[in-house]
Amino acid sequence: MGYINAVEVHNVVKSYNVGFQKIDVLKNISFSVKKGEFLSIMGASGCGKSTLLYLIGGLDQATKGTIILNGKNLNKLKENEQSAMRRREVGFVFQFYNLVPNLTIEENILLPLLIDGKSYRKNKSKLNNILKIIQMEDKKNRYPNELSGGQQQRVAIARALLFEPEIILADEPTGNLDSKTGSEIMRLFKSINKDFNKTIIQVTHSEEAASYGTDILRIKDGEIESKKSNFKTG
Ligand SMILES: Nc1ncnc2c1ncn2[C@@H]1O[C@H](COP(=O)(O)OP(=O)(O)O)[C@@H](O)[C@H]1O
Ligand SMILES: [Mg+2]
């Protein structure tokens, strides 16, 4: 369709009531993410990065303002449309992988299908493709606790790719990994961004991880400090 921005954030405010106090976590945030962009969101711990990412993914609602995802205003979607969008148009990757321990790698990757009530068998070919992308064809019958952290994160990325979403949202995806493994995961994201033309938004507090992005957004005290193209990106 005729939109060029994967994500538009317009004047978003997010406040929490804690006791009798109202805390403005995000004060008045506006920016857009073009299709095919790989945006790194940076900022000190507690500045609202995860909050912003969850608002974009429709996992939480803004106090004020508008978020447009793939041309659709999240505020205007009905509840069932919102949840369908979360399942099919966005892929989530988290810091601690969030794999199900008693399911195999293959079952973990296919889990979104089960949740969506889709046939498991019809999607076997998709599974094989995805296993190739994450280079784990030989591990599909293993369980998460038999894998390293980096391998578990690859599985989480595979699961996020299953519905071929246009947008991948990742919250500190290398936050729990050593720097060498972190770089491997970043290179995987980079190739998913370039070779499959996916829009990626990652939250990170590592300058090294952020440098894989095409753009860097910095948040400070609930406001945008800057959003710049990253010319160093490879
Ligand atoms: N459900 C909540 N209720 C109250 N305060 C919250 C809630 N969620 C997050 N916060 C507060 O919002 C701020 C931003 O949190 P978060 O988005 O997780 O920060 P970051 O990801 O940048 O570390 C923090 O001060 C946090 O304590
Ligand atoms: Mg966070």
Image (spheres, rainbow, N blue to C red):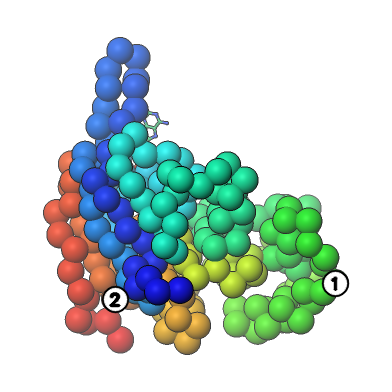
Q: Quadrant of the N terminus?
A: bottom left
Q: Is residue 17 left or right of residue 165?
A: left
Q: Is residue 85 left or right of residue 115?
A: left
The picture places residue 100, in percent across and down from the top left corner, at: 70, 52
Please give the name of the residue rendered at 52% of the width and 61% of the height, measured from the top-left corner. Answer: 90
Q: Crowdedness of circle 2 by 10 Å Cα count: few (<14), some, many (20+)? A: many
Please give the name of the residue rendered at 38% of the width and 56% of the height, measured from the top-left corner. Answer: 68
The answer as to whether callout 1 falls within 8 Å of ligand 2 is: no
The picture places residue 145, in percent across and down from the top left corner, at: 69, 58
- Residue that mark 2 sits on: 214
Q: Secondary structure at mark 2?
A: loop
What amino acid type should be assigned to the residue bearing mark 2? Thr
The picture places residue 176, in percent across and down from the top left corner, at: 46, 57
Residue 197 in view here: yes
Say which quarter of the image contains residue 218: bottom left
> 32 or 129, which is in the foreground?
32
Can you tell which mark lies on residue 121?
Answer: 1
Residue 157 in view here: no
Can you tell which mark lies on residue 12?
Answer: none
Please give the name of the residue rendered at 48% of the width and 79% of the height, measured from the top-left corner. Answer: 192
> 175 or 54, which is in the foreground?
54
Q: Is residue 173 left or right of residue 153?
A: left
The picture places residue 40, in percent across and down from the top left corner, at: 31, 64
